[in-house]
Amino acid sequence: MSRKYPPTTRNVQARLDAIDTAISKAESGTLGRCEVCHEEVEPELLEIDYSASVCLEHLSEEEVRHLESELELAQSVQKMLLPQEAPKIPGLEVAAYSRPAQIVGGDYFDFVEFETGFYGLAIADVAGHGVSASLHMASVQSLLKALAPLSRSPAEVIRQIHKLLIHNIRYTTFVTFFIGTFDPSKKRLTYCNAGHNPPLVLRSQDRTTDAPVLLKPTGAAIGLVEEADFGEDRLDLQKGDLLVLYTDGVTEAVNRQDQEFGRERLASLVRITDHLPAREVVNQIRQGLEEFSEGRPFVDDTTFAVCRITG
């Protein structure tokens, strides 16, 4: 898979046509059925290509190359949806890392500017992984980019995303979503947590003994119920504090003894690296996860971001 195919308008239209075809097959009950042997297509293939209609063993060399290029395209498009670098946010030093469990995934993080002029820090996790989760993730990204500049608070934008998304996903999945806005003059984080893993805040005063502050959910995950109530909370921060956002692929990573990495191990790892720049803290977390997993592949998408409160 050496050739690169930059996404174009024609590529996007072809992708939309493929989605329409897949929906029609799903409605007729033929989605995922091999057109050659009429058996079910391998689940592993469907996870990376929801439109697959021929078993791997029946594909020609040319079709295999085409599949590889399609997967390359899907991967490059998804990478483009994620921020390529952290913006310059007054009062914050930010770094992030994301890796799908498969070629594409359902984790999402971003930085968006609200109507108030404050930057929002967002992280989300679509239930499941693979192509279907990545398609929902793209919808979430589009909605956030469109709604945040017109919204004044995290809860407001979450309510709007939920209202628009729930009818698209038709209760077939759900999305955990955390978004917070940072006021650099007050060093205040205002956030809405829609069923997401509680981000950690490690205070600068005494990280060695103090338990991290948990930014617990203020509402249910998006897409679970029709009438959802999304609350909002605030936290005043200080210079040197660390905010760690993460998806469950981090805390639920397992080693060969089937032990989970866990929230406490994540907090402990951050404590011993808190003197480093945010980018180096991210690298240490990544290395810590890989060492803990002992080479065992991650079964879920893995995403985390580290934010240090500066002067």
Image: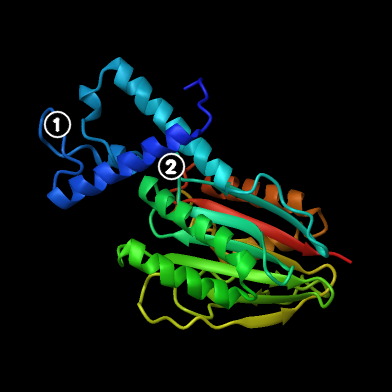
Depth check: give the residue in front, 49 or 268.
Answer: 49
Colour basis: rainbow
Q: Where is residue 62 in the image (x, y as percent from the top left)?
A: 32, 16
> Compared to 58, does 12 lie above or below?
below
Q: Nearer the viewer, mark 2 or mark 1?
A: 1
- Left or right: 248, with 170 as reference point: right
Measuring from the top left, give residue 224's x and y in whole percent: 36, 73
Residue 132, numbered label: none
The numbered disc on residue 35 is: 1
Q: Which amino acid does label 1 sit on?
A: Glu
Q: In this view, does 47 lie to the left or right of 198?
A: left
Horizontal side of 58 relative to 192 (left or right) equals: left
Task: Give me the residue at 39% from left, 46% from top.
Answer: 130
Q: In this view, does 86 lie to the left or right of 58?
A: right
Q: Name the element at disc 1.
A: loop
Q: Residue 102 carries which label?
A: 2
For numbered disc 2, what is the local secondary structure? Answer: loop
Q: Is residue 195 visible in this depiction of the protein?
A: no
Mark 1 crowd level (few <14, some 14–19, many ≥20, 10 Å Cα): some
Quadrant of the rendered image containing residue 163 = bottom left
Q: Residue furthest right?
A: 311
Residue 279 lies, in percent from the top left, at 75, 49
Residue at the image point whose x is 44% and y is 32% from the top: 10
